[in-house]
Image: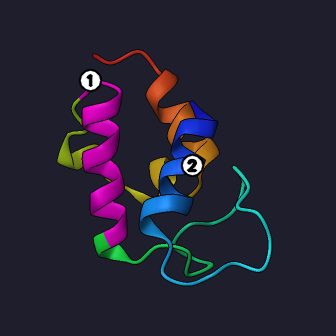
Amino acid sequence: MNEILLTYIQEQLLNNEMEEQLEAQDDLLGDGILDSLGMMKLILFIETEFDTKVPPQDMVIENFMSVQHISDYLAKPKA
């Protein structure tokens, strides 16, 4: 899952060229890797790619801070 997300972000969403390879632990918003529009595109990709729905109450920084956080969120059982 991490590799799919990392590839999508690198190929479709990066605001600027990164000097180093994007890692699963990199802070997507705090480090300026994605802006708010990029984050919304990422959520739409996640919903499509992983056939899931991300409800508004789950669209919080704790779930989307990094690729690893996203993978952990997606792995949690949904109520």
Label 2 sits on a secondary structure element that is: helix
Q: Which mark is residue 76?
A: none
Label 1 crowding class (10 Å Cα cut-off): few <14, some 14-19, many 20+? Answer: few
For label 2, the residue is 7
Quadrant for the N terminus in the image? top right
For label 1, the residue is 51
Question: Mark 1 vs mark 2: which is more N-terminal?
Answer: 2
Q: Residue at x 76, y 63 (%)?
A: 21
Which region of the structure is painted magenta? 38-52
Percent x, y for residue 20? Answer: 80, 72
Label 1 sits on a secondary structure element that is: loop
The front one of 73 and 3 is 3
Between marks 1 and 2 in the image, the one whose residue lies nearer the viewer: 2
Label 2 crowding class (10 Å Cα cut-off): few <14, some 14-19, many 20+? Answer: few
Percent x, y for residue 69? Answer: 58, 44
Percent x, y for residue 35? Answer: 40, 78
50 part of magenta stretch = yes
